[in-house]
Amino acid sequence: MAQSNVVSDVGVSAGGLGTAIASAIVQFNKANVTQNCITMSAAPQGTSTVKFPVYTKHDVTHADYGVKNMASGAEETDANLTSIETTAVSLEVLRNAIRAEITDLAAHGNADALLVNAGRQLGNDIAKEFDVNVCALFDGFATSKGTDDGLRFLDLMDAVASLEANDAPRPYHGIFHPQQIYGSFGLSNEFGITSVASSNGAFNGAQGTSVGEQFMGAGFVTSIAGINIYTSTSVPDGATGRKKGAVMAETAIGCGFIDFGGGNFMQMTQEREEVQAKTVLVANGYYAVAELVDLHGEKMHTEIS
C-alpha cells in the first residue's frame, strides 16, 4: 500500500501528463529555429502522406513573363499563352521519438517540477532533431555561395540575386551556424562599427545603434536587405574549417506533419513500469522533411576558422 501511495504522488494522472505536454510544446516553440523558414503542410485526415504541388511556369510566346499590355481599343486581343507544369513531392510522415524516465524516488514530493522539466527537455530534443533534419538538406542545393574569408555581405546579395533570378518567392531566410555570424570570420565583423538608421529597412530595430548589437540574439538575429537571419547549431559541417548554412525561400524545403491541433505535431504518452517503480514519458514528433524546389535555396559554404 505504501508503494501505491508513492506512485500516486508521482503525478501519473492525466493532469500530470498535461503539464509535461504543455511544457514540451512551449519549449519546442522556443528552441526550434527552422520551422518558420519552410513550407509546412498537415497530412489530410486518415492518411500519413502529404503531397506538395510544385509549379513551373513556362512562357511559350513572350519574353516578358507572358503579360501583354492591351492597347486602347484593343482590349479583345488574345492574351499571350503561358503553360504551367505541376508536379508533386510526396512525403510519408515519420515518427521521431525520445523518452524520459522518472523514478518514484526522484518524484516523491516533487512530481510537478520533474514533469515540467522532463517535458521541457523532451520538447527541446524534438526541436533540435527537427532543425538537424532541415539543415541536413542544405547540402543538396545545387548552387553554392561563399568565399575563403568567411560569410560576407556580398555573399548574401549574390544569394538574393540568384533566388530572384529563379522566381523564388519572398520572404527569404538565412540560416547559419553561430560561427558563421559571430566567429572570427563571421558576418558580424563587417558590421561591428557601422551605424544605420531604421528608415532604410536594412536592420530591424537598428535605429541609431551599432549594427553589431543586432547580432547578439539567439535564433532570429536580424534582417539584412530583406533576408531574415537565424542562427542554429544544427547547421552542418562542410569542408575542414567550414559550415554549410543556407539562404532560401520557404518553397525550398517542405515539412509534412500530423496535426494534433493548432499546427502542433508533438504527442506525448505516459507509461507505467511498476516493477522498476518508474514512469516513462515518451515524446513523439510526427513529421518528415524534404527538398521541394532546388533553385529556391542557396547553400552558403563559408570558412569559420
Image (cartoon, grey):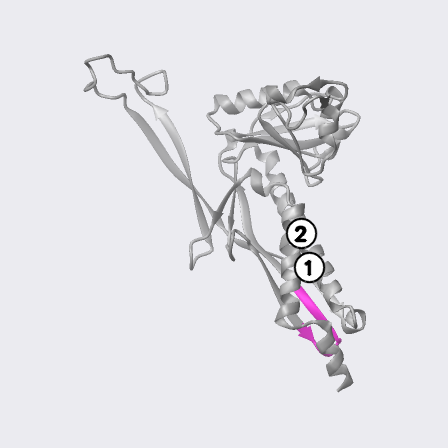
**Residue at the limit of the structure toward the bottom, as seen here:** 1
Query: Eyeballing the image, is 88 above or below 108?
Result: above
SS class, disc 2: helix
Residue 225 x/y as whole percent: 60, 22
What is the three-letter code of the residue carrying label 1? Gly
Callout 1: 10 Å neighbours few (<14), some, many (20+)?
many
**Is residue 279 one of those drawn in magenta?**
yes
Which residue is identified by label 1? 119
Against 181, residue 1 (above or below) is: below
- In terms of secondary structure, where does tag 1 sit? helix
Q: Which residue is mark 2?
A: 27
Which quadrant of the rendered structure holds the C terminus? Answer: top right
Task: Indicate which disc residue 227 carries.
Answer: none
Residue at 49% from the left image edge and 35% from the top image edge: 251
- Viewer-proximal residue among 28 and 168: 28
The answer to whether mark 1 and mark 2 are in CB contact below 8 A is yes
In three-dimensional space, the C-alpha distance between marks 1 and 2, rounded to whole angstroms, equals 8 Å
Write the residue at 71% across / 38% down: 218
Residue 184 appears left or right of 290: right
Q: Earlier in the sequence, mark 1 or mark 2?
A: 2
Residue 262 at what x, y percent from top left? 51, 53
Residue 18 part of the magenta-drawn span: no
Q: Which stretch is magenta?
A: 272-281
Regarding residue 285, the answer to whether it shows in the image is: yes
Classify residue 226 as left or right of residue 168.
right
Please identify the dominant SS of the magenta region. strand
User: What amino acid type should be assigned to the residue bearing mark 2?
Assistant: Gln
User: Crowding near pointer 2: few (<14 within 10 Å), some, many (20+)?
Assistant: many
